[in-house]
Amino acid sequence: MAGYRSFAKNVGLLTIANFGTKILSFLLVPLYTSILSTADYGTYDLALNTVGVLVPLLTQNIVDAVLRFSMDRGVSKSDVLSVGIKHFLVSLVPVGIILLVNSVLRISPELVTLAPLVLFLYVSQALSGIVLYYVRGANRFSDIAVSSVMCSALIIGCNILFLVVFQWGLTGYFLANIIGPSLQSIYLLGRVGLHGVNPFGADWNLEREMLSYSRPMIANSIAWWVNNVSDRYVVTFFCGVAANGIYSVASKIPSILSVVQSIVGQAWTISAVEEFDPDDSNGFFSNMYAAYNCVMVVVCSLIVACNLILAKILYANDFFAAWQFAPFLTISIVFGALAGYVGGVLAAVKDSKEFARSSVIGAVVNILLNLITVPFVGALGAAVATLISYWITWFLRMRKLRSYMKIRVNIARDYLSYLLLVFQAVLFFTPMDLMLIHAVEAVLFISIIVLYQKELLAAFYKGRLLVKKGR
C-alpha cells in the first residue's frame, strides 16, 4: 500500500502542476490560431523541433542520467547537478556554431533571421530539462508543482501581452515560450540551492558513470524525437511550411491526453525505481499497468469521439483542417505512454540499451512510412506513421519486460480496445451522416467503458481507500 500512497501523492502534486495550467494553455489555442498564420506556426514548430533534437545530441543526453542518478542513495546530489550543468554549458559552443553555419549556408532559411531567438530557446529548453529532472529525481514534487504553475502562468500572460497588446507576432510567441521555462529554472535552482555545485570540478568517476548510462540513451532520445516530430520535416519538405503549421496545431487536441501521460509518467519513473520487484509479488506493477492502460484508453476514446466538436472550438480559419490528423495522433499517445511505463522498469534496472534499441526500430519505421505515405496522402500519412511507430516501440519493450519481471496483462482485451480506437478514428473519414457518426462514436466509447469496467471500479475503490487512510 505504501507504493500506491507514494505514487498517488506524486500524481496529486503533478496534477496541480500540470492540469490547470495545461487546460489554460489548451484554451488559448484559438488565440494562437487566430493571430498567427499557418506559416508562422509552422516556423516556430520547426525551430522548437530542431532544438529538440540538438539538446540530447549536444548535451550527450545527460538529462536522463541526472534523473536516474539523483535517485540513488549515497550519491552526491550536488555532483550530479554539477555534471548536468557542465554538459549544458559545453553544448552552447556547438549550438552557436550550428546557427552561424546555417546563417551562412541557409540550410534552413526560415531560421536565419530567427537565429538569436533559436539560441535563447535552446538555452531555456536545455537548462530547464536538466533542472526539472534533477528536482524530480530528488523527489521534490511540491517545488515542481509551484514552479510549473508559475511557468505556465508566465507563458500564458506573456503570450497575451506580446500577441494581443504589443502585436509582436511570431517574435512575441518565441519570447513567451523562452521566458517561462527560463524563470522556472532560476526559481528551482534557488529552491534546491547551489551549495557544492561546481560544473568543472565534479567527481570524474561519477561523470564517467553517468555518461555510460546517458550515451546509449542519446539514440533513444533521438529516436523518440523522430517518432514525435520528424514527420514535421517530411510534411514541410513535401507539402510546405503552411501545411506543417496545420499538422503541428493538430497536436493540441491530443495534448489533453498528453497531460495525463505526463503526470502519470513523471510519477511512475520514481515509483518504478523505489518499488522494483522482479516477481511483482504484491501485484503493484501489474495493477499499475492495468490502471494506466485503462485511463489512457478511456480518455483517448472520449477525445477521439469529440474530435470534430473540439476542432470547431479550437481551430480558427485554415487550421480547422487539422481535425483529420488529431485522432491518429491521440491514439499514438496511448502507445507512447505505455512504452514509457515499460521504460520506467528499464530505467530501474539501468537497461539503457534496450531503451535505445526499441526506440530506434520504431523511429526507422516512422521515417520509412513517412517517406512512402506523405507524398501520396499528405500529412495524414505522417499521423498514421506516428501511430504505427509508437505501437512498435511499445510492443518491443513489452516483450523485453518479461525477461525482467513477471507481469500479468489482459492482452486480448487490450488489443480489442486498441482496434476500437482505430475504428473510431477511421469512422470520421466515412461518407456516413455526421449525426450517425457521432452516435456510433458514443456506442464505441461505451463499449470501451464496459471492457474496462473492472479496472474502473478497482481504481475507484482503491482511490477511496487511499483518501480514507490519508485523513
Image (spheres, grey):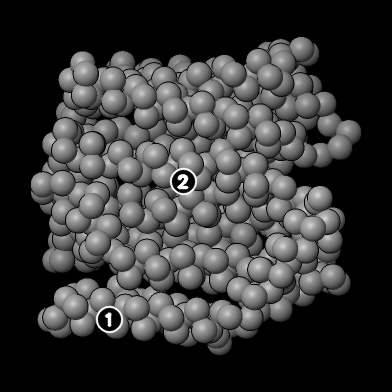
Q: In this rendered view, identify the residue nearer to me: 324 or 362.
A: 324
Q: Of helix, strand and loop, which one carries label 2?
A: helix
**Left or right: 73, with 392 as reference point:** right
Compared with residue 252, is residue 207 higher up or lower down, i.e. above or below? above
Residue located at (15% from left, 46% from top): 316
Residue located at (21% from left, 82% from top): 436
Q: In this rendered view, identify the residue nearer to me: 150 or 399.
A: 150
Q: Is residue 27 visible?
A: yes
Report the residue marked by disc 2.
222
Which of the numbered marks, if any, corresponds to residue 195? none
Mark 1: which amino acid?
Ala
Compared with residue 394, is residue 234 higher up or lower down, i.e. above or below? above
* Mark 2 Cα shell of 10 Å, populated few (<14), some (14-19), many (≥20): many
Residue located at (46% from left, 53% from top): 258
Report the residue marked by disc 1.
439
Q: In this rendered view, identify the residue nearer to me: 353 or 397.
A: 397
Residue located at (16% from left, 38% from top): 34
**Left or right: 311, with 460 as reference point:** left
Q: In this rendered view, identify the residue nearer to me: 40 or 90.
A: 40
Image spot of residue 217 (x, y percent): 59, 46
Q: Which of the image's four quarters has the N terminus?
A: bottom right
Image spot of residue 409 (x, y percent): 65, 79
Q: Quadrant of residue 75?
A: top right
Image spot of residue 314 (x, y percent): 24, 49
**Left or right: 292, with 205 as reference point:** left
Measured Cα–Cα span from mark 2 to mark 1: 41 Å
* Mark 1 Cα shell of 10 Å, populated few (<14), some (14-19), many (≥20): few
Q: Of helix, strand and loop, which one carries label 1?
A: helix
**Left or right: 38, with 62 as reference point:** left
Mark 2: which amino acid?
Ile
